Amino acid sequence: MSLLLNSSFTGASSACLLQRERSRRRRLHVPGVTCRQGSNGDRSDAARQQQSPPLLDRRDMLLGLGGLYGVTAGPKVLAAPIMPPDLSKCYPATAPALDNKCCPPYDPGETISEYSFPATPLRVRRPAHIVKDDQEYMDKYKEAVRRMKNLPADHPWNYYQQANIHCQYCNYAYHQQNTDDVPIQVHFSWIFLPWHRYYLHFYERILGKLIDDDTFTIPFWNWDTKDGMTFPAIFQDAASPLYDPKRDQRHVKDGKILDLKYAYTENTASDSEIIRENLCFIQKTFKHSLSLAELFMGDPVRAGEKEIQEANGQMEVIHNAAHMWVGEPDGYKENMGDFSTAARDSVFFCHHCNVDRMWDIYRNLRGNRVEFEDNDWLDSTFLFHDENEQLVKVKMSDCLNPTKLRYTFEQVPLPWLGKINCQKTAETKSKATTELSLTRVNEFGTTAQALDASNPLRVIVARPKKNRKKKEKQEKVEVIQIKDIQVTTNETARFDVYVAVPYGDLAGPDYGEFAGSYVRLAHRMKGSDGTAEQVPKKKGKLKLGITPLLEDIDAEDADKLVVTLVLRTGSVTVGGVSINLLQTDSTAAI
């Protein structure tokens, strides 16, 4: 059986909308833009085949990721899905870099409708490093953003009103329905990927409406392949509406390679080594999380929960690193470097298009199985202004298949899916233990510990079971769990996690194999005196699947593991480290 990783193309031709609908509340004059043959939705079959790789067999893909263990998911959990907030109650979610709070103009007479999903040709999102040579497409893209920026400041389609949507849902502008103290937060949980998919969808549809082209798509920053791993050139022209001066100029110029382990310290490795590390990070993220969706997407969050710990998946971690790498390195780290202002840079949407594409690939590799058979996820509902200026509500379950939203992705190579030398040379393979500098390592204990950049935290952790059979691995995935993570300032924080086999209670000088990371972006509000104010912070937790990793490092018969936490930036304490077996949720098989 063959599987198209990013959905298939259609032969539908491009078409211009002949007439725009206008809301009763606002009327907006938008000059027409001519649509011609040869745009991104209008290429020939031969051209598409030339740019698309051959179909990959699903067995080969899963084998390329080291296999996939899985069984039927457990019963549904019923509690309370997140529901739309009361828009009349927008709290002062300001930020140091914003002149005004990010609450939108409120119209008490505006009605909320069910969203009518588009019936357009299947739109094709293309890589940013390829569309830069398509002058017709680039003219459309820049014109659409220019018109969005020229809209009245209080129009819901206005460029900065659109950017503020992200601020509203990450800086606690809205509280959950029927609560006064539980804010809506679209990061750090299973909501992250679906909410941002809808955000992209409506932004993209509005841009297309502004130029009367219902085939228009946002490009994706193809940072999972060598050719797309530099900052996209289409955003570098200072005269373009796509330009943003508030970026780290060291990174966006001269073909600098994106570092997915970036932590405000420049990587001195060669370009080829950084590319290899990036591809390995992406490969491990997929390989270690295919059998349990929360490892990729984040933990559940349910309406009314106050004391839950924030828990993002490893895809959000990778996404965070790119934000840090683009945003300003100092001060408030605006725009991309801070949640509150990130969407003010057009590259935000290009970056998130690739994050969305990663989710689409992940779903395909799992046989498009629903990640969470849980009504609290499926029924979570959000509000957006659509391409007809209507305030509409959308449900999480309706965005799982991009074709319902009428878009797909151009097929491009996936080098991280193939064979990459991701393992470090094992120090014990060729050396006797007497030749190594061994250090005694203790258990974590019961007291929270602060991470120290100059002295990584190394703890010895008992495994729940060694030498598990294949069937046992199909039923449960082995997971490192780090609890009570406290970022003690509102600055960015990052630590990386490594795993090694001990010698009794001793550890060698090498930290072992990279297992994953914890990354939190800067997150601040503006106080009444205009200075930065602490955002209410919850403790966080991190879960990293290690079943395939232990096979890779030949650690199946180890009773214990050495887990090392290496602080890269920020001020962090952690409350505990353990290794547990969690029930898998995937029915996919090799």
Image (cartoon, rainbow, N blue to C red):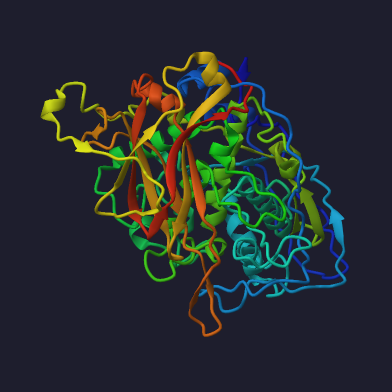
Q: Position of residue 419 (x, y in %)?
A: 39, 23
Identity of the residue furthest to the front in this view: 446
Q: Position of residue 237 (x, y in %)?
A: 45, 61
Q: Residue 349, located in which quarter of the rendered image?
A: bottom right
Q: Quadrant of the C terminus?
A: top right
| Residue at 71% in and 43% down | 377
Q: Is residue 75 left or right of residue 357?
A: right
Residue situated in front as seen by the camera: 307 or 157: 307
The reply to whether residue 137 is visible in this rendering is yes
- Eyeballing the image, is 48 above or below 406? above
Q: Position of residue 548 (x, y in %)?
A: 44, 25
Q: Position of residue 487 (x, y in %)?
A: 44, 59
| Residue at 38% in and 39% down | 278
Q: Residue 161, located in which quarter of the rendered image?
A: bottom right
- Eyeballing the image, is 31 above or below 496? below
Q: Quadrant of the N terminus?
A: top right
Q: Residue 72, located in which quarter of the rendered image?
A: top right
Residue situated in front as seen by the camera: 265 or 51: 265
